[in-house]
Every structure is written in structure tokens, then in C-alpha cells.
């Protein structure tokens, strides 16, 4: 066991931290949007991504030949940690960087790579993900949005939902059904759709937080050039599910949990009831300690996985737990904060009497969205049980 | 940056698992459970040859001079195997007390004997109030000339009836807690075996009446360190035991069929199992850190030890409860082995501070 970072790694961290301290606040892109107009926010968000890209903090795991940093896993984790520590906002072009880019690098033609990759990195083109549909959420492979070949185009009809950032996006990487006769996983194709296409309509959905984070997208005979197919026809499921490399932000999410716990502790120390801080209340203290224990366990769990990855050890069941454990922990931290605040938890962020800058009610709602998105906890548990513990499938 | 077990630790763990799978079988455990001592002496003779007793003992006293992370490998496997007997209390806790607080003269005799397996030690802290709080410790130590003598009654002392010496917490005249070593054959020592639910770990009430004792160095500091070490030892046993309980429940669910299918195909059981492993694996990493923190003298070692103990013991007791449930009726029988771990989990949860005690320690040391 050796938890120290090398002198070079420590120097790197210092440099990254200093850059973050200087630049995150300056960007004006708060972690949550508040009441400013969407277009203003999007403009600032694009500029922030470009700033981050030019500083070398975007696409940490991409190969250099495609504009990435090809950083080793430790440095990748350091950057993720420092981004979390600085409470840097999620990138507007984040989906393109994390998902479309690696997919194109693995499956794309040379034309596709040269056409799309650079602009994914700079934020000059923003991408949204067209996967879920009203009838296909957890059971994504049942998706029905149809693409029919017509000459040198696909004609797309259908609907996508929960499409984050569709209102800003230039393109959508989309899963469509190209063979309705085949078994459901084998009739899907992965295509790139221009968000400004005729027949394509974006309708915002409002989240319970009040933000218009995601959208419905309707396709009415939308024409998509056949060269926008990524990978082979009807092999879209494989394309979508197997990218060779991922952003290794394992320490990023445990840092996020650390941040939130520290903020909860500070809140609990600052609220007085009956003449003493809530952190001194014997029952609440136990709860705080339990949350800190879970937070610490997640941190060391992340470090273990980082070490295993560096050493090329095959990941086991332990690698399937992060989303389930991290999202539920952060939601539990937010719930504890809401309970600590009592009546103050009723107040909206904007109210002048709100505690802790109105952070917690939003975080409490948003963190629940995180438990749901990207595969709900129930789906995660199915995956853990079936793929990790090898329990028999339900069919 | 390397967060994990090194080659030697992995091998130690693997060889312990292989050894115990062969030698600490269900039949062997049940034989020990049925006996009066609850101590499998033949198994321990083999363990002595393997050198497990000396893992923490410095080389100059015949041990391997390793640390808590190495010992945790063995303890985890003992938990996995439901190994009965005094090993944890003797070779992890009592040995540590001597290593940290015993004089060279004392240790050349006793620590060497622990290391070779010739002697067994144990630890006596709580009394009838079952608490580590100094207010609840009445046993007193007084000095006449150069000789210390102890008077008091300790409860829940593991394997006092087979131990050659006991490390005892007592208050000196200044009402400070100190630790003392007492040979069990000394005058004034009386023991009374307690009848336990977990037959793989036996405990006693031990009375001292002006019993000669040797003071260990370090007093309050040593006491705190021993809490850390005991906490990690029990946490390691809990980790292995929980892994075993989960494995048994999952394996059973793959073979037991009802309604035309293996019961493991039903979502309720899948989710129960997934929740157990989702708690267990991060707690494993926390235990590694806590053991490493003790070994490296990290400033947060005590907090980490209490975190590990609090978390792993509550995971173990809730998890074994679930594992019995997942077995259905058969898990409720004496004949099935599931209750061995169920009962060991209960012992672990209470012994050396229940989760609320350790959570409070985390809070207090964390300046909440």
C-alpha cells in the first residue's frame, strides 16, 4: 500500500489546482443555472469548454492523434478530482466527449473522424444523445424510432425523450430501428442526425428543479444521409455499448461525495437548536458519522479501482457498483441536509432566508435525478446480480 | 500510488483460505462447538506451524514482524471459515498489547510464547456495564512497593479459560486507565464461563482479587491503540464472514428451485444480494485503508479503525440476517451452517464496541 503520489504527480496536481482556482470562477458558468437566460448560459458554457480544451483539460483519455491528452490514469483522476474540488460545471459538450467521440474513434470512418472529432473537443459542435423513448427507458433495446432507407438517405420517424441539451445541440447521436423483423438488439443502427434538419422538433421538458435540462425530440420524416451511419447497419447496439476506453473519472465522483459531505457537516455545525449545533445532537451525529463512513468507503473503493486499472487487473463485481453507491450516497447526504434544515428546507434557492445559499433543495432534487438517470438503481442491482454475482436471468 | 494488497498479502490470504477450507470444515467446527472448551487444539497446533501466531510479533521475539494489513488477511479468512478459538484475541489483540507496552524481559517470555503457539493470551476491558467509558471501569490497580495488584471483575473475556495470561484494563490510584498483564494461574483469579449463543467464541467472567500484575507501558495511549487494533481485527473477521454469508446465499439461490425456476432469478433476491455486495466491497477498501493507517501511523488511524468496525459490523449483522432469510426454512435449522455466521455476526457487532460507540468515536475525533 502506498497512497502517495509521485513528486511529478503532486506537481501536476498543484498546477491543475492553481489553474482551476484561477479559471473556474472567472468562467461565470455556475454549477446550476439559476434564473439567467438559456442562450446566455449556453454561450458562456461553450466558451468555458473552449477554455478548458485549450488548457488541455478536455478528453483526458483520448489518444493524442485525435486531439486528446492521452493522460495516464493517475493524472486523469487528478484532473477529475480537481474539477470536482473546484465545483467546475459539467461540460455542455460532455456527452460528445464521453460518448460520441470514443465511439467514432473505435467505429467511425476516417471521414467521420476528421469531420466531427475536433469540434466535439472544442465545443464548437454540441451533441445530444438520442437513446431513451417514452416507451423505452430501462428497456432501451425495445426502442421504436424507425429509420427506413430511401436512396442515399435514412428517413427517420419517431420520438426521443430525456434528451439533455437538445435545445443547444448541433447534432444527435441516435439509436434507431432499421430492422423491425430482427430480434430487438439486432435491428438497431447508430446514426448521426443534424439537429437543424427539417422535420425535427425539440420540445423542452421541465425538471422538478425548474430547470429545462432535457427535452422531447420529434422526428417527422427527417432525412439523414446514409454516410452518417456509424458502424454497420443493424449493429448499432454493439457500437453503442462497446467503446474501447472511457473517461476515467473514478476519483471525480468520490470527490463529489466528499465535497457534499463536508458541506453537510459545515451546515450541521452552523445550525443551532436548543442552544447547541445539530452536529452535537446525539442522534444526528450518528447519522453524520454513518454518512462519513460511507463516503470514506467510496473514496477508498475508487482508489482501489484506480490502482487495479493502472496495474491492468481485470475489473470484477467491484467495478459495477460505482453508479449505484455514489448516486444513492449523494442523495442520502442531501436528504440529511434537508432534515437538518427543518422548515428552512421548504425555501427555494432564490429566497433571501434560504440557508447555505439555497444549495440543498436543488441538490436534493437533482441528486434524485442522478439516481434515476443512466440506469436506475433497480437496473444497476439487476446488472450487479446477473453480471457480477452470476445470478440467473429472469427470463 | 498503489492502493491494494501486494503479492505477499494476496498469497497469505489465498494460502489461509486453502488451509482453512481443508482443515476447518463444518464437521470440525461443529465438533468444537459441542465441546466444553470451544477451542480446536489440533487445528491450532497446525496454525502454530504456519506461523500465524507470530504475524504481528517482532522478529526479535520470534515473529514475522508484519503489520495489521497482513494480519487482516488471516483474520478475514478466519471469519470466512468461521474458525473457532482464541486466535484473534490472542495473536492480534493481546500480542499487540505486549508488543506496544511490554518490557523486553516480559516479551521475551510471553510474546515469544504467543508467537510459537506455546501460550495464549486474551484481553479484558469491559465490566458489567459493558462499556469502554472510563466511568464504567471499576477494576483498580494498586502498587505496593514494586508490585502491582489488581482487584475487580471483568466480563466477556474471550477464552480466559484457555489463556495463559490476560491483558486487563484497570484504573490506577490517579484514576487513569492503564493496561496490565496477569498470568491466569496467579492467586486471586477466579473464572466463570458464560454460556454464549456463538459457540465458536467462548467468553468468561473473570474476577481478580489482589492479583499480582505487570504494568504495560503507555497507559491511556496504549488503551486507545488497542481499541483501534481490536476494532480492525473484528472488522476483518466481519469482512470475511459477510463474504461467506453472501456467497452461501447466492449459491443457494442458484440451485434452489421454486415456481419452476431457481429462486435467484427472482428480482427480490437479486436486489438483496446486489445490495449486500454494494455495501461490502467499498467497506473492504475502507478496512484496507484503516489497517494501513495503523501500520503507517497516519493521524486519522483511530477514526479509520472506528469507521471500519462500525461499518463492517453493521453490514455483517444485517447481511447475515438477510442471508438466513434468502435460504428460507432451511436457513433456520441447526443442521444448516448459515446460523454459524449469523451468530458470529452478532458477537462481532457487540464485541469491542458496538456501531453506535464507534460512530460516536468517529464524530468526536472528527470534531463534529
Image (cartoon, coloured by chain):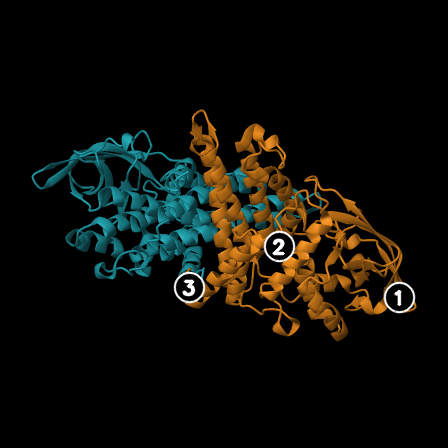
The residue positioned 60% from the left and 54% from the top of the image is A27
Host chain of mark 1: A
Q: Which mark is residue A390?
A: 2
Host chain of mark 3: B
Host chain of mark 2: A
Q: Nearer the viewer, residue A37 or A163?
A: A37
According to the picture, the residue beneath numbered tag 1 turns out to be A153
Judging from the image, what secondary structure is the residue with disc 2 in? loop
Which chain wears cyan?
B
| Residue B338 appears in the rendering | no
The residue positioned 65% from the left and 52% from the top of the image is A383
Chain A colour in the picture: orange
Residue A260 appears left or right of B87: right
Instruction: Relative to A350, say whether A170 is above or below.
Output: below
Judging from the image, what secondary structure is the residue with disc 3 in? loop
Residue B42 appears left or right of B267: left
Q: Position of residue A192 (x, y in %)?
A: 79, 63
Distance CA(mark 2)–CA(mark 1): 43 Å
Kindly indicate the quadrant of the structure image that contains residue B144. top left
Amino acid at each position: 500500500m502506498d497512497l502517495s503520489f509521485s513528486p511529478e504527480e503532486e506537481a501536476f496536481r498543484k498546477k491543475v489546482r492553481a489553474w482551476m482556482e484561477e479559471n473556474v470562477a472567472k468562467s461565470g458558468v455556475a454549477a446550476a443555472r439559476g434564473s439567467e437566460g438559456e442562450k446566455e448560459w449556453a454561450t458562456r458554457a461553450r466558451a468555458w469548454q473552449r477554455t478548458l480544451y485549450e488548457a488541455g483539460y478536455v478528453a483526458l483519455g483520448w489518444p493524442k492523434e485525435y486531439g486528446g491528452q492521452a493522460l495516464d490514469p493517475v493524472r486523469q483522476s487528478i484532473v477529475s478530482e480537481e474539477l470536482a474540488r473546484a465545483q467546475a460545471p459539467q461540460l455542455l459538450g460532455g456527452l460528445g466527449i464521453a460518448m460520441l467521440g470514443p465511439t467514432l474513434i473505435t467505429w467511425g470512418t476516417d471521414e467521420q473522424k476528421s469531420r466531427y472529432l475536433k469540434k466535439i473537443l472544442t465545443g464548437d459542435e454540441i451533441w445530444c444523445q438520442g437513446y431513451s423513448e417514452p416507451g423505452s427507458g430501462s428497456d432501451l433495446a425495445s426502442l421504436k424510432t424507425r429509420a427506413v432507407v430511401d436512396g442515399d438517405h435514412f428517413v427517420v420517424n419517431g420520438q426521443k425523450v430525456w434528451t439533455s441539451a437538445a435545445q443547444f445541440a448541433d447534432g444527435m447521436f441516435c439509436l434507431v430501428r432499421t430492422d423491425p423483423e430482427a430480434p430487438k438488439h439486432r435491428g438497431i443502427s447508430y446514426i448521426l442526425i443534424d439537429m437543424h434538419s427539417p422535420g425535427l422538433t425539440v420540445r423542452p421538458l421541465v425538471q422538478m428543479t425548474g430547470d429545462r435540462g432535457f427535452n422531447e425530440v420529434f422526428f417527422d420524416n427527417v432525412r439523414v444521409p446514409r454516410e452518417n451511419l456509424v458502424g454497420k447497419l443493424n449493429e448499432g447496439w454493439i457500437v453503442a455499448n462497446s467503446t474501447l476506453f472511457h473517461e476515467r473519472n473514478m476519483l471525480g465522483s468520490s470527490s463529489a461525495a466528499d465535497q457534499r459531505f463536508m458541506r453537510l457537516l459545515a451546515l450541521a455545525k452552523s445550525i443551532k437548536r436548543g442552544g447547541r449545533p445539530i452536529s452535537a445532537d446525539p442522534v444526528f451525529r450518528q447519522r453524520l458519522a454513518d454518512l462519513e463512513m460511507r463516503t470514506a468507503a467510496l473514496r477508498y473503493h475508487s482508489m482501489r479501482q484506480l490502482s487495479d486499472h493502472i496495474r491492468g487487473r481485470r475489473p470484477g463485481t467491484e467495478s459495477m457498483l460505482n453508479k449505484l453507491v455514489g448516486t444513492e450516497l449523494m442523495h442520502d447526504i442531501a436528504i440529511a441536509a434537508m432534515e437538518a434544515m427543518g422548515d428552512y428546507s421548504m425555501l427555494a434557492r432564490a429566497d433571501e432566508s434560504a440557508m447555505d445559499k439555497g444549495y440543498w433543495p436543488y441538490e436534493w432534487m437533482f441528486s434524485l435525478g442522478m439516481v434515476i438517470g443512466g440506469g436506475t438503481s433497480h437496473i444497476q442491482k439487476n446488472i450487479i446480480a446477473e453480471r457480477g454475482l452470476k445470478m440467473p436471468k429472469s427470463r | 500510488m498503489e492502493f491494494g494488497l501486494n503479492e505477499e498479502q494476496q498469497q497469505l490470504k489465498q494460502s489461509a483460505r486453502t488451509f482453512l477450507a481443508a482443515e476447518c470444515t463444518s464437521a470440525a467446527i461443529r465438533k468444537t462447538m459441542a465441546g466444553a472448551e470451544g477451542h480446536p487444539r489440533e487445528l491450532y497446533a497446525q496454525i502454530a506451524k504456519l506461523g500465524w501466531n507470530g504475524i504481528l510479533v517482532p522478529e526479535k521475539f520470534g515473529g514475522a514482524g508484519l503489520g495489521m494489513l497482513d494480519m487482516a488477511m488471516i483474520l478475514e479468512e478466519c471469519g470466512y471459515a468461521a474458525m473457532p478459538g482464541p486466535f484473534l484475541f490472542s495473536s492480534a489483540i493481546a500480542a499487540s498489547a505486549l508488543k506496544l507496552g511490554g518490557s523486553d524481559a516480559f516479551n521475551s517470555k510471553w510474546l515469544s510464547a504467543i508467537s510459537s503457539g506455546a501460550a495464549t493470551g486474551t484481553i479484558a476491558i469491559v465490566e458489567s456495564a459493558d462499556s469502554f467509558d472510563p466511568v464504567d471501569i471499576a477494576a483498580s490497580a494498586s502498587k505496593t512497593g514494586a508490585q502491582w495488584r489488581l482487584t475487580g471483575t471483568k466480563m466477556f473475556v474471550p477464552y480466559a479459560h484457555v489463556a495463559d495470561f490476560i491483558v486487563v484494563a484497570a484504573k490506577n490510584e490517579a484514576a487513569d486507565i492503564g493496561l496490565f498483564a496477569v498470568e491466569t494461574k496467579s492467586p486471586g483469579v477466579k473464572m466463570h464461563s458464560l454460556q454464549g449463543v456463538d459457540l465458536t467464541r467462548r467468553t468468561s467472567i473473570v474476577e481478580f482479587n489482589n492479583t499480582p500484575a505487570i504494568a504495560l507501558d503507555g497507559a491511556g495511549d496504549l488503551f486507545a491503540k488497542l481499541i483501534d487494533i481490536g476494532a480492525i481485527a473484528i472488522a476483518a473477521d466481519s469482512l470475511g464472514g459477510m463474504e461467506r454469508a453472501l456467497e452461501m446465499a447466492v449459491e443457494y439461490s442458484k440451485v434452489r428451485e421454486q415456481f419452476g425456476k431457481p429462486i435467484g432469478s427472482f428480482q427480490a433476491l437479486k436486489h438483496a444480494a446486489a445490495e449486500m455486495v454494494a455495501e461490502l466491497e467499498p467497506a473492504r477498501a475502507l478496512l484496507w485503508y484503516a489497517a494501513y493507517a495503523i501500520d503507517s501511523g497516519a493521524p486519522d488511524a483511530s477514526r479509520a479503525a472506528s469507521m471500519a468496525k462500525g461499518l463492517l459490523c453493521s453490514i455483517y449483522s444485517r447481511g447475515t440476517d438477510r442471508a438466513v432469510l434468502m435460504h428460507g426454512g432451511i436457513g433456520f435449522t441447526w443442521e444448516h451452517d448459515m446460523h454459524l455466521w449469523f451468530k458470529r455476526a452478532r458477537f462481532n457487532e457487540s464485541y469491542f464496541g458496538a456501531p453506535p460507540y464507534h460512530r460516536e468515536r468517529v464524530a468526536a475525533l472528527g470534531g463534529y
